[in-house]
Image (cartoon, rainbow, N blue to C red):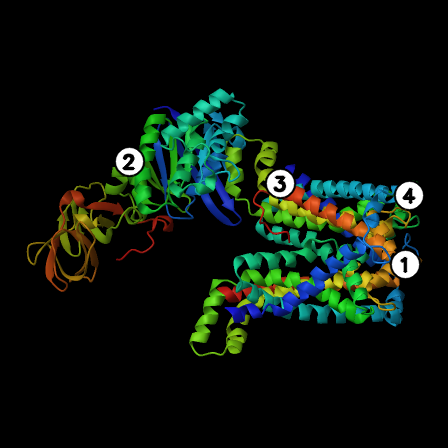
Amino acid sequence: MKKSLKFIYIGIVALFLYLPIIALVVLSFNESKSMAVFSGFSLKWYEEMFSNRMIMQAVINTFTIAITASITATIIGTLAAVGIDGMKSKQQNLVLGFNNIPLLNADIVTGIALLLTFLMFGISLNWGTVYLAHVTFCIPYVILSVRPRVNKSTNTLYEAALDLGASRTYAFVKVVLPELRPGILAGFLLAFTMSVDDFVITHFTRGAGINTISTLIYSQVKVGIRPSLFALSTIIFVMVLIILLLVNFLSKRGKEKVIY
Amino acid sequence: MKELIKLEHITKNFGNLRVLDDFSLTVHENEFITLLGPSGCGKTTILRILGGFETADEGKIFFEEKDITDLPANKRNLNTVFQKYALFPHMNVKANIAFGLKINGKSQKYIDDKVDYALNLVNLKGFENRSIDKLSGGQQQRIAMARAIVNEPKVLLLDEPLGALDLKLRQEMQYELIRLKKELGITFIYVTHDQEEALTMSDKVIVINDGYIQQMGTPEEIYNEPENAFVADFIGDSNIIGGTMIKDRLVKINGHEFPCIDEGFGNNKLVDVVIRPEDVIVRERGAGKINGTVLTRVFIGVHYEMLIKSEENEYEWLVQCYEKYDIGEKVSLDVIPSNIQIMNKPTSSDEEAIDLDI
Amino acid sequence: MTSKKALATPFMIWIVAGTIIPIGAIAYYGLTDRNDRFTLENVLAIGNSVHLQALWLSVLLALISTVICFLIAYPLAIIMKNSNFGKRGFMIFLFILPMWMNFLLRTMAWQVLLEKNGVINGMLEAIGLPGQEIINTLSAIVLGMVYDFLPFMILPIYNVISKIDDSIIEAAYDLGASTSEVITQIYLPLSVPGIVSGVNMVFIPSLTTFVISNMLGGGKINLIGNIIEQEFTVSSNWNLGSGLSLVMMLFIVVSMIFLERFDKTGEDSFI
């Protein structure tokens, strides 16, 4: 009795979370444009999506920005995580406090603040400003993921490598980096998803004509949603599902490797 | 003594694993009873079924002759002291001890008095306002005891409560527990894998393995007269040797005949013979029955512990004695009749000891 | 050690250029007029009845959404903790997966569901019930907020609750506590850090959103986020937009300090 109650509860919440997604998936295969009636199976919205240059450009923009911004953020953030470890604790707290600001602040404030800064320095809004903005809000996620891994043992390892005659660069690349790898990977993935998912900050910092998936949807919603966006949603959902399953699977295998 | 708890034909499976199989047990009032066995033997499961945290797949539990099989944990008149104490980390010492009393709607005055009394009992007077994470392991242990006993349960269930303490503290706490048990006059059901704890504190020890009771008895009975090789091996170190019962009161070990005090095994019957290491007498060559050579020798405090290899059949005897013999020295071994314990050969695999050195 | 510190240099530059200067820029624009003269007008403009109403509505809707998220997430976290291990991993995956889906797409999905000629009304009509007008109402906005931010409430609460030792819960039952007493006296006080981060992660984005109100409110319902956004994209009055942003930041800081006081342990993660 009690168990079935729990089951029903979980079912209702899951339904609430998945109903909209399922609706999009179903409608993406709908023959008609109707959002209420399923009139027959068709792939035409997928065709329309792939032949729509605006959508394709937005997809390309989304991923090029996400990849370049998260790689940049991962490099800066990883270096910073190690560097912060070498600071005095007072200095550390101050720096980490600033690091937390973009995390805790509302996206709209971060977006506006960056917009004003670009305009103040006469930088015109384009692809590059979006990239810089994305790096800014991605760095904190990388630091958050990498920092817990920078601890005494990496320090000792680094010093031991120097003691054994390694150069600083060699010691960092060959000894410290492998130790940090899981954190770096997690930070990169987190930064990447945050970048792909972002709308608000992109909205304020993008130049005219530059769209990501998010900003494209936002502008489309105003004029009326076409089912080709449902096709896009379905593809994104399936991709997210595959990537998450893969990451889960790989990280589980990775753990086993550590044990053996 | 009055019967307090009866477990009848309890069976419990975890998935495909049968942890308890037709397990029955009677606990009397004011007993200190210990469930002793290796990890995974089912002893903790019995305690959790008693406490109401697991339900038995089959069987019934009676408490003062009332069926409590389906009674939830919060309605049972017994309290548990958990392995890792399970103190509430967000409450101070006093709030922890007062928890059960508050739940039961006792008056503030009653609660204050009871907490005072309990803290006195566990020798932690004045600790009321300490926070839990400021206490040592031993102190947390005492608070966990106090928290359980203020509710005046008829039975206290203790799940390896000393397992996390260091050796010296553990020995101290053993005396504390015996004292507490005497002062409270209630039943203790104690679970441990530590045979020393079991022997020191209990009125009755129940040795469990693979979900079955292997032997039940006073600590002396369990130690001196193990009923099978598992018990003998689990309770202290033992020499367990194959032998032949020639007739009543005469057993043949290593080809030598030894008088003993056991009867009723039949004639020319194969048996297991248990001889405790401290009961093996080491003499100069020729003065005992079994000839052997000293293989190893370690001084372990009061006495020496040696392995002596029998020349007849290569069996390595574990021996404890006060005299020092050199490695390689040729000696003879002997045993007096009352120190020879005869057991039937195991009939099922359940009773078989893990590694018999025969 | 000094050379190690140097590794953080690019990051330090980025903090100055990407965090400190931009916040300074908001403060500068917010506290000056078009002619760069100091003024409090932009900040005080919050007293304007339209702005005040938008702010009040934002706070109200954010509070309602946060409470609903909490009421859904808390029992769920407890159920997840008490389910057996294999199932647990699957359930976490189940409830976190939608979070990885693009936020705009998720909001758009509700628009499609709630639309006058949308999925839900289609279903209702199919079984002979009258269609409902949910889209473009306050309820639709709250629904959108709850839907978009629910995983952010589930995750931190589950993280804290899953770490509560089972034996502590058993000890409470053992001492006679009923299920409701176990929840109020053990689970709730022990999960305060998770609740605080969950509330933070739902309340602040709800308070400051303009996307959800725009997409599900049909552009007719203005929250404070919408007002600020319009000042930048439509009216191009950056000074006023910045001034109102300063007020909003004040609300964020106040709500965080307020929540922080509940969380005595203080240093728990907000991710």
Given the image, what chain letter belongs to the residue carrying mark 4?
C
The amino acid type found where label 2 is placed reads: Thr
From what the image shows, is residue B250 above or below residue C234? above
Q: Which mark is residue C133?
A: 4
Q: C191 and C251: which one is in front?
A: C251
The amino acid type found where label 3 is placed reads: Phe
Viewer-side label of 2, 1: 1
Residue at numbered disc 3: C262
- Circles 2 and 4 in contact, beta carbons < 8 Å: no
How far apart are the alpha carbons under marks 2 and 4?
Answer: 78 Å
Q: Is residue B275 left or right of residue B2?
A: left
How far apart are the alpha carbons under marks 4 and 1?
Answer: 19 Å
- Are discs 4 and 1 both within one chain? no
Residue at numbered disc 2: B218
Residue at numbered disc 1: A225
Q: Is residue B333 left or right of residue C112?
A: left
Q: Is residue B20 left or right of residue A183?
A: left
